[in-house]
């Protein structure tokens, strides 16, 4: 997956999640020029308890370039991730 962003402007990365399971996406590290501003969950308006949600990461890039972000899906108390995904970011 490729995301395009503008230098200095916030951008979002959305990943499907099941917060009721205890598993959440984490961003263990970021390149020096990428700042994690926070994350949140968004559910469908008619969602019920246990339904999947979207975990949204809010980020900002300090300078132009190509960056690779690796997200891992794991429970906070476990050391091993059950899944990972890589997102490439092209900052103009």
Image (cartoon, rainbow, N blue to C red):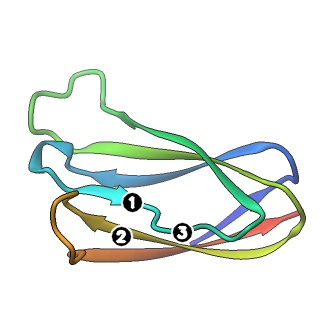
Find residue 66 and name its label.
none
Q: Which residue is mark 3?
A: 29
Quick one: 42 or 47, which is closer to the camera?
42
Question: In the image, is residue 61 above or below residue 71?
Answer: above
Which callout, 3 or 2, points at the residue further toward the start of the chain?
3
Q: Residue 7 vs residue 43: left or right? A: right
Residue placed under numbered mark 1 in the picture:
26
Q: Are marks 3 and 2 in contact (CB under 8 Å)?
A: no
User: Gap between marks 3 and 2, in whole Å?
Assistant: 10 Å
Quadrant in which residue 37 is drawn = top right
The residue indicated by pointer 2 is 72
Quarter assignment of residue 45:
top left
User: Disc 3 versus disc 1: distance between alpha carbons?
Assistant: 9 Å
Q: What is the quadrant of the C terminus in the image?
A: bottom right
Left or right: 30 as drawn, with respect to 72:
right
Disc 2 and disc 1 in contact, CB within 8 angstroms: yes
The residue at 19%/56% (across/down) is: 23
The image position of residue 59, as x and y in percent, is: 65, 49
Cα separation between marks 2 and 1: 5 Å
Query: Residue at coordinates 35% horizontally, 76% vertically from top-left?
Result: 84
Percent position (x, y) of residue 3? 67, 63
Contact flag, marks 3 and 1 (Cβ < 8 Å):
no
Q: Residues within 10 Å of mark 3 (few under 14, many from 20)?
A: few
Q: Residues within 10 Å of mark 2 (few under 14, many from 20)?
A: some
SS label for mark 1: strand
* Mark 2 or 1, nearer chain start: 1
In this orientation, which residue lies closer to the viewer: 66 or 4?
Answer: 66
Q: Is residue 59 shown left or right of residue 77?
A: right
């Amino acid at each position: 997956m490729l995301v395009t962003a503008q230098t200095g402007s916030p951008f979002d990365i959305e990943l499907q999640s099941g917060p009721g399971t205890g598993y959440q996406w984490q961003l263990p590290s970021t390149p020096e020029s990428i700042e994690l501003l926070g994350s949140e969950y968004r559910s469908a308006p008619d969602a019920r308890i246990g339904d999947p949600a979207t975990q949204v990461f809010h980020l900002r890039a300090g300078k132009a370039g190509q960056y690779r972000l690796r997200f891992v899906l794991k429970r906070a108390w476990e050391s091993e991730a059950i899944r990972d995904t890589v997102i490439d970011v092209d900052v103009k």
